[in-house]
Amino acid sequence: MEKIVEEIKKELEEDLKKISSMNELNDLKVKYLGKKGKITLLTKDMGNRSVEERKEIGRYSNELKSHVTSSISQLEQELSQKELEAKLENDRIDPTLPGTAVKVGGVHPLTKVTEEIEDLFVSMGYDVVSGPEVELDLYNFEMLNLPKGHPARDAQDSFYITEDTLLRSQTSPVQVRTMLKNKEKTEIRIICPGKVYRRDDDDATHSHQFTQIEGLVVGKNISLADLKGTLEIFAKKLFGEDREIRFRPSYFPFTEPSYEVDISCFRCGGKGCNICKNTGWIEILGSGMVHPNVLQMAGYDPKEYTGFAFGIGVERVAMLRYGVNDIRSFYTNDLRFLETYNRVEGDK
Ligand code: DAH
């Protein structure tokens, strides 16, 4: 027995010398320790042996097994260390190589302006609400005091889907929706940002899809002074503390009286320049006192309630704010454009 064991040990020693990879070492493990391995075979016909012989075989084979196991695991460690070193050698990183730039997304200028306006109005107690882009003619026009055939409908060439539904041409229908939804007919203070659609030919100042922010305040004793004060805060906050506003009489079917609101030019301060087309004033939004018919149709008693409304063109504000002269730049997703306006100095 002893002889056999010595032979196996010797053979193992020779075998170990030849091993140069983990794979080979695994084969070697099988050769000695596997089910049909040399050590297993030693104990194979134990059943036919005497007790004494069995003891001896057991002792020898156990001793041999631990010898083989430790020799193999020693070599295993050496090999894995070598493999690791080789790998590190090959995978060596060169810290002087330029890295792969990770593109970080930014906030779109229209989203920025929208969020800024939202923050301002939320700070004044307004709720931000939304409405559907596929809208009923009833809310987009009729209940805003624009019955079928009303000439003012022509000013908003619309995308009709059926006779009664269209892509909303303004965010004003959200006024109607909000008033109808308020069953208790309590006071309302909302703004609604969103996309609107018109059948315009796209050019530097027109787009068939653009963004508006609607505002609506309904309550008791709401007056034009409230509207003026609110819009003054808006103008100063967005275009600078020195801004003044001016109301020019206008016409919208859903407000009476109606106004176009101008701000004093933030570039020239009112002296006249190319931004304000030498007038000193820049038009920024439409507004007015909610027409009694609109309140009435939405279930608010116009004798008890009054309100004001306004509609801000987000693109217009963003164009002025960032000095963009082509509205289409907002939609073509040119990263060079978007990156530029993400880095406007002093901007949030
Ligand atoms: N909806 C108008 C438009 O798209 C803008 C507007 C004007 C909204 C006056 C208002 C308003 O709420 O009071 O041209």
Image (cartoon, rainbow, N blue to C red):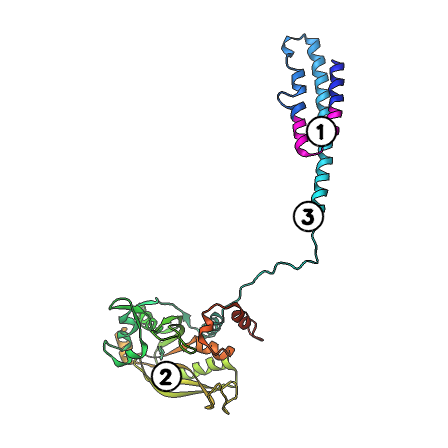
Inspect the image, locate mark 2, and give the three-letter code of the amino acid beneath it.
Ser
Q: Which residues are magenta?
A: 12-29
Residue found at x 44% / y 75%: 327
Residue 269 has which mark? none
Name the quadrant where ligand 1 sits. Answer: bottom left
Q: Residue at x 47, y 81 (%)?
A: 235
Query: Relative to 17, is 86 above or below?
Result: below
How far, Cα to Cα, is label 1 from label 2? 93 Å
In the figure, residue 131 lies in which quadrant? bottom left
* Mark 2 residue CB less than 8 A from any atom of ligand 1: no
Q: Going 56% across and 63% down the picture, which residue do you hit?
A: 104
Reading the image, the residue beneath label 1 is 72
CA separation in Å, label 2 and label 3: 74 Å
What is the chief secondary structure element of the magenta stretch? helix
Q: Earlier in the sequence, mark 2 or mark 3?
A: 3
The residue at 73%/24% (across/down) is: 12
**Residue type, numbered disc 3:** Asp
Residue 149, x across and y down, in percent: 23, 78
Q: Residues within 10 Å of mark 2 (few under 14, many from 20)?
A: some
